[in-house]
Amino acid sequence: MKYLYITSAIIFLISFYACENVIDIDLNSSNPALVADAFIEPNKAASLSLNYTADYFGTDEPKYEGNAEVVITSSNGNSEALQHRGNGIYTGNLLKGQVGQNYELSIKLGDEEYLGSTELLTPTSILELDFVEASGPGSTRGDDAYNLIILFTNNVDEENYYLLKYFMNDEIVEHQFTALPAEFIGNTEVVQYDPLFPVYEKGDKVRVEIFSIDEGTYTYYSQLQEITRGRGGSSTPYNPQSNMGNDILGYFRAWSMDSKTITINP
């Protein structure tokens, strides 16, 4: 997964007569920041990718971190140290994700420790994936434009949030994902969601993945959604808030997923 990292800039306020002058703006370089992408799924061991951001103006590839001490602990008291497998990838082996458990991830680097926690909720089931002729903004593509209709289950005994990812012809649709809050879902066992984006054409092979996520993971992805779609509500770019501390980017999430595939064939 790609993470946004924005270098800071010095912004000058210019008086009305300065428009005739040449203004030099100094864009600062930034020190590398630690990025953690960690997750655990039902019946699978935890995985972590750990690396550093590259300077915005630099040409070097991001550097991997292979010297961290990484431990995952479940709310039932089980724990496991994740092993470095190379290129900043750490994985577990024995501790597998269980629905209803909370998990804490500890990353130690020298004197620094980063802690994140998350809850693994009940997976949804996609009951129906269908399409309809586009009627929203995407309909400007012409008659051969279609939106999805998605029906999926919801566990009313949990406060579930959902993340939807879209794939077209076996490739993920970049910057097109949906984070649905519990308020949208409500207290219903079956949810219908009709996204206006992405828009598909006849013959497209479409896959939808729906992840059951907790509130913190929803907040992270809703912030990311605002940034990638240019709706951050601020003139100053920012990074989504990590659940592992202020001095680290990325997120530790527990999620369960179901997927379904159709071909647009009206």
Image (spheres, rainbow, N blue to C red):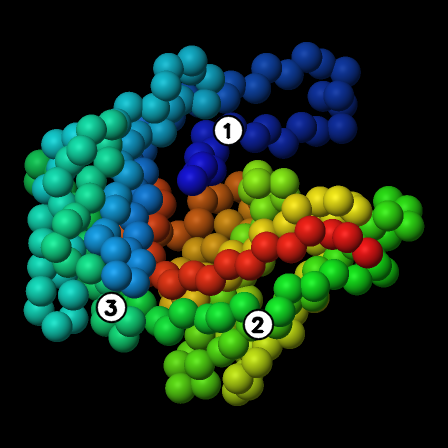
* Lower sequence index among marks 3 and 1: 1
Amino acid at the residue labelled 2: Leu
Considering the numbered disc 1 on the image, is that residue within a helix, a strand or a loop? loop
Location of mark 3 (residue)? 98
Name the residue carrying label 2. Answer: 127
Q: In this rendering, does residue 46 appear at all?
A: yes
Left or right side of 100 for 179: right
Identified at 86% across, 48% down, the residue is 144
Residue occupying the point 39% across, 81% down: 158
Q: Is residue 1 left or right of residue 228?
A: left
Q: Against 35, is 159 above or below?
A: below
| Disc nearer the start of the sequence (2/1) | 1
| Front residue of this view, candidates 249 and 122 | 122
Label 3–label 1 contact, CB within 8 A: no
Secondary element at image label 2: strand
Question: Which amino acid type is shown beneath numbered disc 3?
Answer: Gln
